[in-house]
């Protein structure tokens, strides 16, 4: 097995008709990890793996489109595919919101560890580190290294974050590109396709994939704007796509 990233959902802020919110499955020879689990991601997750084979869940921030399927997974592991103490890593704000909707009085389904930008994780053969993204709440942009191959996810981020904060060499980057350059400079706390591509080019990112496009966006317009700024091919994250590193 190689190191790969499968798109379960990539829709920005709310689900599109045929695209759940954010959720990615990271698979390597030594670990299977769910990165974010926005609404609707449990369905496609089951087309990829047996849920009992999941080794851990990592949540980047507390906005509901990135974690609200966690209570659904708790139902699965409490009543159906029963398991306990599945490692979950997330910010303090995300934990507080999860605690508010968690039913008490049963064996703990999840073993929660609160993480911040200084945290490092070893999940099987996956080495995780984090930087602080440019977003209104504490948002962690993860860097994952497996056998010398590096994957970076910007999570939700405005242009105040840069790839060079995450790693010196990046083989695959999954970048927030919620809108087009016409909306730059406004109140949207996300990068445009152009801004993401400029930062990827400056950092020498080898392969750039755009994600978190808002429903109704034209993926080809995002791709074209990014390619002009990146100077090479750019891809768009679509449900079911797998990117091998």
Image (spheres, rainbow, N blue to C red):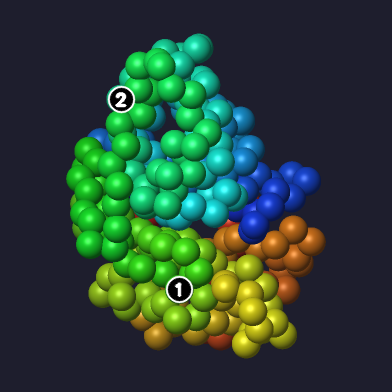
Q: Residue at x 48, y 29 (%)?
A: 102
Rendered location of residue 233, percent (x, y): 55, 73
Label 2's element? loop
Which residue appears at 41% of the width and 63% of the height?
Answer: 138
Q: Nearer the viewer, residue 232 or 19?
A: 19
Residue placed under numbered mark 2 in the picture = 85
- x, y percentage for residue 202? 40, 85
The span from disc 2 to disc 1 (Cα, nearest Å) is 32 Å
Residue 151 relative to residue 17: left or right: left
Of callouts 2 and 1, the N-terminal one:
2
Q: Looking at the image, which is closer to me, 223 or 84? A: 84
Label of residue 134 in the image? 1
- Residue drawn at point x = 54 percent, y = 67 percent: 176
Q: Nearest the camera: 62 or 100?
A: 100
Local crowd at mark 2 within 10 Å, few (<14), some, or many (≥20)? few
Please give the count of numbered marks on the rendered protein: 2
Left or right relative to 198: residue 41: right
| Vertical side of 152 occupied by 38: above or below | above
Q: Quadrant of the N terminus?
A: top left
Q: Is residue 70 above or below residue 35?
A: above
The residue carrying pointer 1 sits among few (fewer than 14), some (14 to 19) or many (20 or more) residues within 10 Å by Cα, namely: many
User: Is 65 on the left or on the right of 85, as rendered?
Assistant: right
Q: Position of residue 210 (x, y in %)?
A: 56, 65
């Amino acid at each position: 097995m190689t190191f790969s990233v499968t798109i379960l959902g990539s829709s920005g802020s709310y689900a599109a008709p045929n695209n759940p919110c954010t959720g990615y499955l990271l698979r390597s020879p030594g670990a299977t990890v769910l990165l974010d689990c926005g609404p609707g991601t449990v369905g496609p997750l089951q087309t990829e793996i047996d849920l009992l084979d999941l080794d851990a869940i990592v949540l980047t921030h507390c906005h509901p489109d990135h974690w609200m399927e966690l209570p659904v997974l708790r139902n699965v592991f409490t009543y159906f595919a029963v398991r306990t103490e599945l490692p979950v890593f997330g910010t303090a704000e995300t934990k507080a919101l999860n605690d508010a909707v968690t039913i008490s009085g049963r064996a703990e389904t999840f073993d929660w560890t609160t993480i911040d930008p200084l945290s490092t994780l070893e999940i099987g053969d996956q080495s995780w580190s984090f930087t602080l993204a440019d977003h209104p709440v504490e948002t962690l942009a993860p860097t994952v290294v497996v056998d010398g191959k590096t994957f970076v996810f910007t999570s939700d981020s405005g242009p105040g974050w840069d790839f060079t904060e995450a790693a010196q060499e990046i083989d695959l980057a999954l970048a927030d590109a919620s809108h087009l350059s016409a909306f730059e400079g406004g109140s949207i706390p996300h990068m445009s396709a152009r801004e993401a591509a400029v930062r990827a080019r400056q950092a020498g990112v080898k392969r750039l994939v755009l994600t978190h496009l808002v429903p109704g966006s034209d993926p080809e317009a995002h791709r074209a704007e990014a390619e002009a700024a990146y100077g090479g091919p750019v891809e768009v994250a679509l449900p079911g796509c797998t990117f091998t590193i």
